[in-house]
Structures are given as structure tokens and as C-alpha cells.
Image (cartoon, helix red, strand yellow):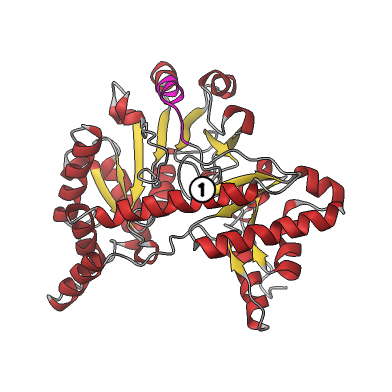
Amino acid sequence: MSANKNFHIPRHITNVTPETAFIVLEKAKMIERQGREVIHLEIGEPDFDTPRHIKEAAVRALERGETHYTPTPGIPELRQAIAEYLKEVYGVDYDWRNNIVVTTGAKQAIYAAMFTLLEDGDEIIYPNPGYPAYPAAAVCARARPIPYRLTMEDGFSIKPEKLAELLTPKTKIVVLNSPNNPCGSVMPREDVRGIVELAEDHGFYILSDEIYRPIIFDGLKHESPLNYASNIDRVIFVDGFSKRYAMTGWRLGYLAISKEIHPYIVKVLNIMTSCPVSFTQYAAIEALRGPQEPVYEMVREYEKRRNVLIEELSKIDHIRFIKPSGAFYAFVDVSRVLKKVGMNSENFVMHLIENYGVAPLHGSAMGEYGEGYIRICFANSMENIRKGVKKIGQAIERIFS
């Protein structure tokens, strides 16, 4: 107990749920330190190395002495490259000076947007199961997070007619994440367009987290609110470099926002981190403007791995799943298994780590509606995917034997 009688942690901080995938990772690492093998299917991180030309750009920047503070919203050259990229991909004209802000990872982009826009009494609607940073950021901003329950029956997509039932005059932001973490789903055109129409009718912002945008399979097309919004000022566009370019440790993301919001976002970021890391921004310019073949190669490999995963999951009884269309996750319904053994999803994952040497992520780590599921990340070798899923199958077979 603290000697300071006035010591008190505010409720909005104690109520925040951290990203528990890292807790599972630590448990798996602890087992490994005992000399036992663990197959890691828990952390959502590309297992590829950052492409060489990107790393070389960072080295050149270091050798030039690019090791000092930069403008809070990022160096002009990177913001220009981002605006060019958004024009090329989405056909949208953003002014790099007034619409683009570089952040220390896409997670910071999410937090900065919510800190800037939300106040007491506001509500955000977010996908659940979903990335835990959405409700955490809302709680820290003292707003109320309202979960939209994603279901397998709806293809883990947000349906406009069901979203409309959750809207209130207090709804300030609706979060979209497609391709989706943890479900691997890709929102179809009619759902994205319908949500844009709702936003225009009701006046809420759409925070569109498109960090997995390039990782789509089976020839599907990515659909963004930017493709349908008559007023892009109501769209808060979030993206980054971690997943596409295997740059998770570089911590670079960005926001595309309205001119009206821009100075306030910059103010929040200035208070938080002053500016993004200098030399990594020059690497990001090379990522955007340099050869994209490494990205295409990674996506082709992810699709092969997805196919191997589906092949192996199809051999297991007593589970349900749908084929992931994007990102690098499968969200597997193991509720029948949990009921049989009397465990929740977190206990089941710990059982798999301790007794079978395989570490998926419990579905409840992605929200209360993720209970009954496990998330399997297939950003791993085909050999490890086969071996890991077979171990999960062995555990389930033993439970029902």
C-alpha cells in the first residue's frame, strides 16, 4: 500500500483493458525458457524482415545526420508521399500540409483522434470482437464505448441496419476495421456504403482503420469509406507501415483528417511525443515510393499459408470457422470444446501452451464477444502452422475421447 494517503488511480484508467496478447506471449516465452518448444500463433506480427531498400534508406538518413527533432506532424517529404499514395489508391485529394499527420504507430493515431474529438458523454461504436485499442482509447478520453457484436453469421461485418439500432444523439464516432483483426473478414461494398450513408444522415465520424488494407485474398477488392463519402471530412483515415512493410518495430502510422481537426490533432501529438522518430520517416518515404513487389510477395505467401491453415482446421471436429478473406488471422469458434471441458477461452489457451506447446490467442482478449473463440495468426511458416493446428486438434480430440 502506498504511504501517500492521497494516492488514487482515476477510474477511467483502472477500467482500461490492456492488449493481453502480450501476456500470452510472455506465458509462452516462460515455457520456452524451460527448454520446451512453443509454436507462436498469438501475436499479430509479420514474420518477414523489413525489405532491404527500406532499411537502407534509414541507414542513409542516419549517415546524413537525420537524428534530430522533426515537425510534430512529420517531415514534409513523408506527408507529401502519403498524400500522393492516397491519391493513387483512393483517388482522394489531400493537402499534405492541412490533412496529413504522421504518428508513432497507428495505435497512436487512434488515440490522438479520440483524445481530440471525444468528451464526457460522447459514445463511440466499435467492432467487438475487435482491436482492444478502440475501447481503451475511448475510456481514456472519458467517452463511452458501445460494442457492435460481430457474428460469424454476418461474416464478421458491421451491417448498417444493425448499426442504426445502436445510434444515439451521443454517437460521435463509429469505428470500422477492414480487413479485420481478429476475424480476418473484409467488409463488402454494400455494408461500407450503407455506413457512410448513415454517417452523412446522423453526423458522426467514421474512424476507418485500414492498417491491413493490402492483405486481401481470393481477388477481393478493398472497400473504404473514402470511396463513397461525399464529404471526406467526416472520415478519420488511419493507416501505417507495420503490417504492409513488416515494420512493426519502426512505429510509424498516419492520419488523414479534415483541415478543421488537423491543428488540434497536432497539438495532442506535440504533448504526447513531440514528433515521430526522424530517420524512420525517411525509410517510410522509400517504403511508399520504392518497389512494392516485396509487399505483393508477402501477400501471396500469406494466402498460401491461409490455405494451409484452412486445410488443417477442416480436419478438426467440434469447431466452426469461416475462411479469412484478409489480414492474417482466423477466428475459430471453440465454444463447444469449452463447454465440454468447463473452461473459458483464456484457460483453454493456457492449457494449450502448457500441455501442447502451441499458443493461439484467447478470443476474450479481443473483447467480451470474442469469448468462445481463439484467434490463430498465420503470419508464420507453413510448417509451424501445420504443426500448431495439429496440436490444437490433438488437444480437442483428447477432450472428446
What residue is at 85 percent from the left and 51 percent from the top?
Answer: 400
Observer-nearest residue: 344 or 380? 380
In the rendered image, which quarter contains the N terminus?
A: bottom right
User: Where residue 105 sits in the image (x, y, percent)?
Assistant: 37, 57
Looking at the image, residue 297 sits to the left or right of residue 152; the answer is left
User: Where residue 264 sits in the image (x, y, percent)?
Assistant: 31, 44
Q: Is residue 188 magenta?
A: yes
What residue is at 27 percent from the left and 42 percent from the top?
Answer: 262
Q: Report whether residue 140 is seen.
A: no
Secondary structure mostly seen in magenta is: helix
Q: Secondary structure at mark 1?
A: helix
Asked where in the image residue 272 lies, by quadrant, the reply is bottom left
Observer-nearest residue: 37 or 55? 37
Crowd class of label 1 (few under 14; some 14 to 19; many from 20; radius 10 Å): some
Figure check: 217 above or below 73: above
Asked where in the image residue 231 lies, by quadrant, the reply is top left
Residue picked out by circle 1: 307
What residue is at 84 percent from the left and 55 percent from the top?
Answer: 399
In the rendered image, which quarter contains the C terminus?
A: bottom right
User: Where residue 390 sits in the image (x, y, percent)?
Assistant: 67, 59
What residue is at 32 percent from the left and 23 percent from the top?
Answer: 228
Q: Amino acid at mark 1?
A: Asn
Observer-nearest residue: 355 or 246? 355
Q: Is residue 321 magenta?
A: no
Looking at the image, residue 351 sits to the left or right of residue 169; the answer is right
User: Where residue 242 sits in the image (x, y, percent)?
Assistant: 37, 57
Write down the region rendered in magenta.
186-195
